[in-house]
Image (cartoon, grey):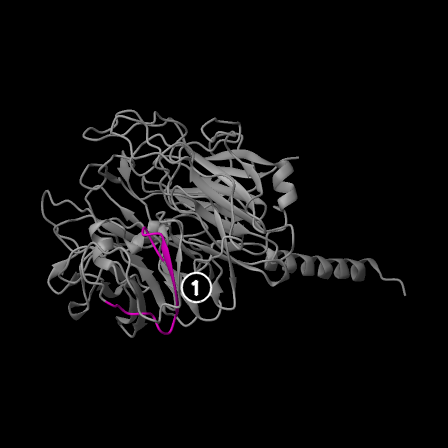
Amino acid sequence: MRMGFKEGALVISLMLGVVRAQDTKESFNLYTQRVDNQRTGVNLVEKELTQSSVKTRFGKLWTLYSDAKVMAQPLYVSNLVSAKCPQGCNTVIFASMNDTVYAYMADQKPTSSNDTLVWSKSLGAPRPGSHDIDESAVDDPSWGILGTPVIDIANNLLYLVAFNDDQMYRLYALNLRTGEIAKGPMLVEGSIEGESFFRREPKWSQRRKQRAALLLDHGGLYIAFGYDNPSGIGGWLFVYDPATLQQRTVWSAEPNGKGGGIWMSGTGPVADDAGNVYLQTANGEFNPSRNQYGNSMLKLRLQGEKLNLVDSFTPCNQSYLNHEDLDMGSAAPLLLPGNLILGGGKFGTLYLMNRDHLAGFVAAGGIWRPECQNSDRVLQTVDVHRGHIHGTPIYWKGPNGTQWIYVMAEQQSLEALPFADGKVKTADTDIRTSRWKPPHQSPPACHHPAKNWMPGGILALSSEADSPGTGIVWALVPANGDSNGYRGVKGMLMAFNAEDVSQELWRSQGSDAETDTPDSLGLLARFVPPTVANGKVFIANAGDREELKRYCSTRPTKFPDNYAVVVYGLKN
C-alpha cells in the first residue's frame, strides 16, 4: 500500500524523533566536576575519539577567550537551548579567577572574540592575590572562582561560589540559559563551637580557599573549604538548600583545632547512591575525642539538618604525615565495585577498604615512623613509589572483563594497576606503565628553574563502554617544572591507550615535552581535569606564555597576554 504525502511525512518525522531521542540519550553531559557525584572521571559514551582517530587526526582546533586563569573544570551541556541557540547547541561553561562565568558554543570555531559566546556574567571584583593566601604568587593577580560549579539541569541552574575583593565568599545560582542571577548572592558564613568562619572587621584577611568542587546530592548543596589560616580552623563543609540558598548546616573536621582542610586538589566531595558523602582531609590535629580528624578519610551523612560523621580511617602514621606535610587530603577517595573504597595522598600509599567498615585508627607511636601497621580492616595497601598523589585515581572496566585503576603521582609514570577479585594486583608483571616519565631532579634553589613536576598527572578517561580500541586515558601534566612553586610552567596534554598505557597515542608538546608545537595549550592550570565530551577535549589554561620564574619575596608585575579554554578534537 502506498503512503500519501502526509502519512509519509509523519513516518519520517517519527523516525527522526527516534534518532534524536537516541542521540540525546547517548550525548554526553558533564554537570559536575569529574563527570558525576562519584567523581569517576570517566566518559563511557565517547564514539568519535578512538585510539586510532586520536593517533592519526587529533589536534588543537581553537581557543575560547577568558579574562583570567581558569582553575575550575569546564562543564558541558548537550543541546542547551538559549537565545544564541534557540534550537539547542552543545555548550561548554567555565569560570575564571576574575569571577566571570562564560558559556560558549562547543562545536563552532570562533571567528571573532565573541561570536560563539552564548553568554557571560561578571560577579564582581575578585580578591587580589597576596602572600597570605598565595605564598609563591603562582595564581596572581586575582582569586575569584576556584571551585568547579555544579549544574542542576532539571531546573536550568548553575551553582557557584565567588570570592570577592571584600574577602567574602558568595553563593549564586545562575540561569543556565541566560547567565543571569536567579538566586543569591548568599554570603557563605557560619560558626562552630565559637569559631567564626568570617569576621566582618577592617583589615581582616580571609585565607581559606574554596578549591574543592561543589556537590549537589540528595537535596543538599555541599561547599568545602581548605585550610590556609594558621590562626583558625580550616576544614569547613557547608550544606545549603539549593531551592532557597538557605544554610542547612555547617561541619568542621577541626572544631577548635587547626588544619584538616578539605581541598583534594580540586576534587569535590564524593557521594554514593545512598547519599553518603566521602572526603579526605589535609594536615591537622587528630583527636577523635574532640572530633578532630586531620589526615583522614571520612564518611558523612546528612540526616535532617545535621551532618554526622558515621565512619573514618586515619593512617597509623598520621603524626608522621602531619609533620612531613604528607597530607591525605591531596586527593579524593575512589569508589570501587564490591562496595570498596580506595584512598591515599602525598605519602604515595593507597588504602583499600570496605565502604561500610572503614578502618578507624591504630596508633603507631613516635612521630618519625613512616611505616606502621594499620587495622586489619585495611584490606590492602598499595605503594605508588612514594610519589605525591594529587590526581584522584580512575577506575575503568575494559574489554574482556579486565579492570584497571589508573594513577599518576608526582615524578612518576602513568600506572595502570589491574583490579580483580576485590584486590589490586601489584606484581611488576601485572602493572603497566607509560614510557614517559618526568626527569627526576632535586628541588632547586629559589632562583633556578623548577623540575619537581608537581602535581603529577590529572586524569580523565573516555571510551565507548568496554569496546576494544576506544579506551583512552587523558593526562594533563606539567611540561617543564613545578607548577606549585613557579609561574610560567607549561602544560602538556597526553593521550594513552587505556588497554596498554605503554602506548602513547598523542601529546601536545614536542618529544622533549618542553618544546612547543601548534598543538600546545599554554600554561598549566594545575589540578584541572580534562573535559572530554562528544568528540572534543576542553583544557583550561593559566595563560598563553610567561617566564619560568619563582617569586620568593616579590610578586609578578607582568602577566600572560591571553587566557583561554583550549579546544581539541579530530581534524579533517
- Determine whether 478 is above or below 77 in the image: above
In reply to whether residue 130 is colored magenta, the answer given is no
Residue 542 sits above or below residue 168 on the image: above
Please identify the quarter of the rendering in which residue 132 is found. Answer: top left
What is the quadrant of the N terminus in the image? bottom right
Q: Is residue 261 left or right of residue 3?
A: left
Q: Position of residue 122 (x, y in %)?
A: 34, 41
For the C terminus, the image quarter is top right
- At label 1, the amino acid type is Leu
Query: As drawn, which residue projects farthest toward the right?
Result: 1
**Extent of the magenta region:** 344-362
Circle 1 is placed at which residue position?
335
Residue at the (39%, 27%) spot, across then down: 545
Between 405 and 523, the residue placed more toward the observer is: 405
Identify the main secondary structure in magenta. Answer: loop
The image shows residue 27 at horizontal and vertical percentages of 58, 54
